[in-house]
Image (cartoon, rainbow, N blue to C red):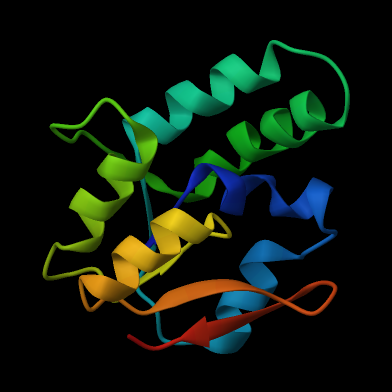
Amino acid sequence: MIVLDTNALMMPVESEVRLFDELDRLLPTADGYLAPEAVRDELDKLADGAGKEATAASVGRDLLDRCTLAATGADYADDAVLELARRDDVTHAVTNDNPLKRRLLDAGIPVISLRGRNKLDITQP
């Protein structure tokens, strides 16, 4: 399983990344996608706004259909992503959030993030 952060789900609009195509390219044998309910809640709030961020959040909310939503003990999306990433069935996390990326790497979790204009790459801990 691959856990996705809010900004990962917004990449298709913000960075013109074909998110799931890129994830399939990097990890063709991945067995699914996971997102915490806190990410859904954050996307809902952002989608209520205006402009490119709201559009990106709306698209991200639609992309959640390809993910399994999971409850966590955390209300804050970054904490929820980290909590899920520590599960035994999770192999990678996807985020462009540098503080979260550092926390994930420090916890020994490989991170997939944007490299270049619209490609993803894996950073090992």
Give the image quarter of residue 107: bottom left
Direction from residue 77 to residue 65 in the image, left or right: right
Task: Name above or below for residue 13 compared with residue 59.
Answer: below
- 80 or 68, which lies in front? 80
Location of residue 26 by image quarter:
bottom right
Residue 21 coordinates in the image, percent (x, y): 68, 73
Quick one: quadrant of the N terminus? bottom left
Q: Quick one: quadrant of the C terminus?
A: bottom left
Residue 49 in view in this figure: yes
Residue 27 at least partly seen: no
Q: Nearer the viewer, residue 62 or 110?
A: 110
Outermost residue, top direction? 48
x, y percentage for residue 65? 52, 41
Query: With respect to residue 62, does 48 lie above or below?
Result: above
Q: Report x, y in % for residue 62.
A: 63, 35
Number of on-image labels = 0
Q: Residue at x 56, y 27 (%)?
A: 43
Lateral position of residue 23 relative to residue 55, left or right? left
Q: Answer with left or right where residue 125 lies relative to residue 11.
A: left
Q: From the viewer's perspective, tell me whether residue 50 is left or right of residue 101.
A: right
Residue at (88% x, 22% y) in the render: 51
The relative height of residue 101 versus residue 9 in the rendered view (above or below) is: below
Residue at 37% of width from left, 36% of height from top? 77
Residue 16 horizontal/vertical position (percent): 85, 59
Q: Nearer the viewer, residue 62 or 51?
A: 51
Give me the residue at 52% from left, 41% from top: 64
